[in-house]
Image (tube, helix red, strand yellow):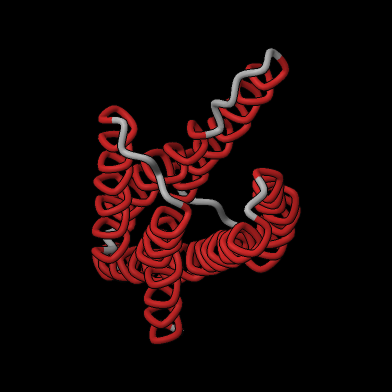
Amino acid sequence: TAMEEKKLTEKESLELIAEMIRNTKSKLELGDGNILLLWGYLSVGVAAMVYFAGMLTHSVYTNWIWLLIPLIGFPAMKYLDRKKTSEYSASTYVDKISAGIWKMVGGLAFAGMALCVGFMLFGYNVWILMFMYAFVIVGFGAAVQGVVIREGSLIFGGIFGILAGGFVVCCVMSGIPLRHVWVIPLYMFCFLLMTVIPGHIINRKAKRLC
């Protein structure tokens, strides 16, 4: 009868919506976990290279090693994005929000680097700006991403990164020197909290849903 067909249609619709929610959650968490791990391990690894190179040579030119992060990271991220798109054809509103967050973070990175290079051409060293970016902007992006996908480890890591950035800013404003021996380990610790640990947690949750 028409009434039975209506009930069946409603039931099928609810099941379809529930399945879409499950698939979306699994897709989002798995993709975000891999991208977080990419940037996290890359940032920590490059920071370790800068740390040990600086301790051995005591040269300011070791800071050029930081450029490995965008040079390796952005092509690798594009590869992961293509892989994610090939595995999942549908893109949800939450996916678009998440992509928008990290596009803004990436855009600010390029803008900050352009400012630093511009000032460097006139003999001014303002590369501390990128250090602030790494703590505050990346931390903010991680915290907002955590709110979007409801992941507490991302929120905690992001807030910790922002507070660490605030601490570094206070040191600069107070004339306290940013010693190589502690500021780079702080950077590495923040990226472990903001990206690596949440990335593993997110992927572990995604595997449970599969």
Q: Which of 5 and 58 is in front in this view?
A: 58
Q: Nearer the viewer, residue 81 or 187?
A: 187
Query: Compared with residue 147, is residue 208 higher up or lower down, i.e. above or below?
Result: below
Q: Please name the residue shown 37% across and 40% down the image.
A: 177
Question: In the image as oriented, which residue stretches furthest toward the top?
Answer: 122
Residue 116's image quarter? Answer: top right
Residue 73's image quarter? Answer: bottom right
**Left or right of residue 156, residue 109 in this image:** right
Report x, y in % for residue 34: 55, 68
**Left or right of residue 111, residue 26 in this image:** left
Quarter of the figure with the N terminus: bottom left
Query: Compared with residue 171, is residue 123 higher up or lower down, i.e. above or below?
Result: above
Q: Please name the residue shown 61% across and 57% down the image.
A: 54
Query: Compared with residue 32, is residue 148 higher up or lower down, i.e. above or below?
Result: above
Q: Can residue 11 be seen in this snapshot?
A: yes
Residue 109's image quarter? Answer: top right
**Left or right of residue 95, residue 160 in this image:** left
Q: Nearer the viewer, residue 141 or 53?
A: 53
Report x, y in % for residue 101: 45, 40
Query: Compared with residue 189, is residue 167 higher up or lower down, i.e. above or below?
Result: above
Q: Please name the residue shown 25% across and 34% down the image.
A: 170
Q: Please name the residue shown 45% across and 37% down the image.
A: 133
Q: Can residue 89 be seen in this snapshot?
A: no
Report x, y in % for residue 40: 52, 63
Report x, y in % for residue 84: 64, 63
**Left or right of residue 151, residue 195 in this image:** right
